[in-house]
Image (cartoon, rainbow, N blue to C red):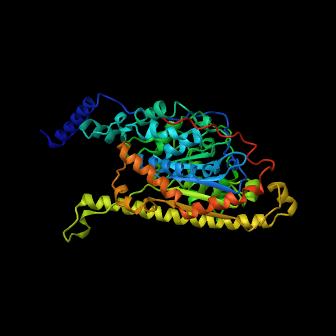
Amino acid sequence: MNTKWSLSLAFVFSICLGAAVSGCSSVDTAPINTVSEHPRPASPRYIPDAGDDGTTVVALAFSGGGMRAAAWAYGALLGLDSMVVDNIPYRRTLLDNVRSVAGTSGGAVMAAYLGWKGKDEFEDFRERFLYQDAESHMATKFHIGTIITAALSGGANDRQTFARWLDEQVFDHATFASLHKPENPVVWLTASDIYNNTPFLFTPDVFAALCSDLDNLKIADAVAASAAFPGAFAPVNIETPKKDCQYVAPAWLHHALNSASASVRLRAYARALESYHSSDLPYVRLLDGGLTDNLGITGLTLDRAAAQDPYGPLSPRQAVRLRRFLFIVTDAGVQPGYSWGGQETSVRLDQLLVAAFDTAMASTTRMGLDAVTLALQHWQTALITYRCGLSSKEVLELRGTLKDWDCADVSVTAHHISFRDADAALFDRLNTIPTRLTLPRQDIDLLIDAARQAVVHNRAIASVVTDAKKEAPVFDGLPGVATDFKPPKPAAPKP
C-alpha cells in the first residue's frame, strides 16, 4: 500500500480510536459572554473608598501556581486579618483596608472569592476549595483519548470540567453582578489574550469594548479562563461584536493609541481592545493569565497607567487622606533545585526544557516586580505634587481636618511575599509542593500557616500597623469615617 495513504489511514484510525476511548466527547467552545447591541458602562474611575479613616489603603495581587498559590494567598489573608489597626468604633484589621484584589491562574480563585464573599465570610474557602479534589472533575490521565482531544481541540479540558465544578461547588452560580458591594474590594482577574499576546482583564472597560455585559458573566468562567493552562485546557472563547453597539472608547484608550508618552504595555493593551471591533477577529481566545502576568499585577499597574489625573485610581478624598498605600504581592512561585547541577555529563533535553521554562518565568517575575516598584515610585511623586498644590480650604473639605496635615507625608510601596519570607526551615519543603489543582491537606495547611506567619512577621507591614494605630484618633468621629459603613458581621463559631 502507498506509504502516504498508509500514514493517512493510520492517522484517521488514531483519531477514531481516540474519540471512542474518550466517549466521543466534543469540546465545549461556546463563548462565555453574550454580545449586545446596547452600549455597556465603562470601568469606575476610582477604586472604592476605604471604610475607615483612609490613611492606609491596601491592594493585593495573588500569583499563579495552582492550588499552591490559592493556599498561599489564603494564608496571607489570615495574616492581614490578624493585624488590628483600630478598635473605634469597632475592631478593624489591615484586611478591612484592602480596596482592590487581583489574581491570576490559581490566585484568581482566591481573589474572586474574597471579592465575592468579603472579608467577613471568606474563611470557608479552605473547606470549599482548598481541601477539595478539583482534579477529580477533570481529564488528567494521559491516554490516547485525552491526547487526541488536546491535539485537535487545544486542550484536554473545556468549560464543562473545572469551570462547571467551580460554578456549582465554589461560586454558587454567582455572576460579576454579585461583586458590586461597597464594603468589598474591586476585583481584577487576569487571563491572556493569545491572539494579541496581551493580558486580558475582566473589567467593565474590556467588556464595553466587546459590547458585552460583564455583570452577566459567571465568576467561575472568568476564573477558569485565568487558570486555563495550555494543553490541560482548551482556550476559552470570547465573542466579539458583529454590529455597532454605540461603543465609546474611554479617554485613556485614545491617549494610549495616540500619545508618544504612553507606556508600551498600555499601548499594546489599548490595541487589543481596538482589535475587538475588527471583522477579522470574530473570537478572542483566552488561556492562563500566567502567560502574560504570573503575579497578578496587571490590574493595578494598567489602571494607574490609564489614569487621567495624578491620584487615580484613588479618588481625591482618598489621595488627601492617604498616608500609606501598600501593594502586597503574594508569590507562590517555586525555586526548584536541579539534580544535574553538580554533574559533568550532558543534561537531557527534557531537563533543559524544564530549566528553560523556569528561567523565563523567574526572569519575567523579577522584571515585573521591578517595573511595578518603579511605577509606584512615580505615582508617589505625582501624589505629593498634587497634595502640596492644594489650598488649606481644599484639604479641609477632602480630609475633614487640618490636624497633623503634611502634604509630603505619603508613601506608595510594593511588598513581595514569597517562600523566602517564610520560616527558613520550611523553604525547601515549600518548594517541593507541585503546581496542581489538588493537594494533600498537610500541604495546604503548611502553605496557609507559612504565608500567615510571613505576613505577620514582615517588618514593613508590621510598621504600617503600628503607625496606623497611633494615627487613628486623628479621624475618630469625623464624618465619612468608619461609621458610614455597617459594622462587620460577627464571625461564625468555629467547630
The residue located at (52%, 30%) in the rendering is 173
| Residue most extreme to the right | 393
In depth, the one of 281 and 130 nearer the eye is: 130
Residue 1 percent coordinates (x, y): 11, 38
Instruction: Give the vertical position of 381 relative to 236 (above or below).
Output: below
Instruction: Give the vertical position of 44 relative to 17 (above or below).
Output: below
The answer to whether 347 appears left or right of 482 in the picture is: left
Residue 2 occupies quadrant: top left
Residue 116 percent coordinates (x, y): 58, 38
Residue 409 percent coordinates (x, y): 72, 67
Residue 229 visible somewhere in the drawing: no
Residue 393 percent coordinates (x, y): 88, 60
The answer to whether 190 appears left or right of 489 in the picture is: left
Residue 425 occupies quadrant: bottom left
The residue located at (77%, 52%) in the rendering is 476
Residue 233 visible somewhere in the drawing: yes
| Residue most extreme to the bottom | 344
